[in-house]
Image (spheres, grey):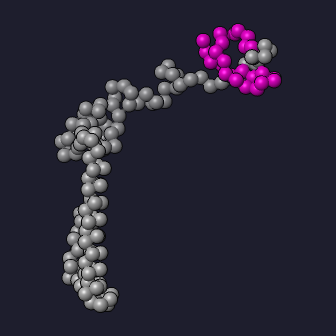
Amino acid sequence: MPLYDATCREHGTFEVLAKAGAPILCVCGAEAQRELSAPAKMATLWSGGWRQGLGGDGFFSHSAGQRVSDKREEERIMHSRGKINVKDLGGEAFEDTFTAGKQREKREHDALVATYTSNLKAFGGDKTRAVTETFPAKAMLEQAATHDAKESA
């Protein structure tokens, strides 16, 4: 049975399953007016390429950057390029790596704070000298060069 839109004068518009040509009754018992509705998008209707990717013609893989016939072909292409699917890494690989990096950065930061604090005490509260000793210009320039090299790669 098809799904129809119907309108009752008292209860408004509603959907109902009904046989074609049979009267549609509202919950109040009054006969409802059958409304026009668009047909469902089915395989036999509206062949505007909507089935693309569902049949044997494959789909466009954004990961591979080309059309592939199925997921297995996509995986073969990605593997040949040295790429690994995140699902194959196991567990929480990305999160574990990210967390480990953040923990390393925090340890480095804490070490610098401790060095600055000790230099501040050693130089009797002279902040300029404490900063100069904690962050020597040569080391900072080397760190900036390393950072720029990573960014441009």
- In the picture, measured across the screen, residue 26 lies left or right of residue 78, that is right
Vertical placement of residue 47 versus 110, above or below: above
Residue positioned 28% across, 60% down in the render: 103
Compare residues 80 and 93 and report the one nearer the observer. Answer: 93
Residue positioned 24% across, 37% down in the render: 75
Compare residues 99 and 118 and report the one nearer the observer. Answer: 118
Magenta stretch encompasses residue 5: yes
Quarter occupied by the N terminus: top right
Vertical placement of residue 31 versus 36, above or below: above
Magenta span: 1-25
Q: Indicate the quadrant where residue 60 lies.
A: top left
Q: Could you tell me if residue 78 is visible in this image? A: no
Vertical placement of residue 26 versus 102, above or below: above
Residue positioned 26% across, 81% down in the render: 118
Please state the horizontal and vertical placement of residue 92, each as a whole percent of the image. 29, 45
Magenta stretch encompasses residue 125: no
Vertical placement of residue 108 versus 91, above or below: below
Q: Indicate the quadrant where residue 28 lies.
A: top right
Q: Indicate the quadrant where residue 57 lies.
A: top left
Please state the horizontal and vertical placement of residue 62, each as a whole percent of the image. 34, 43
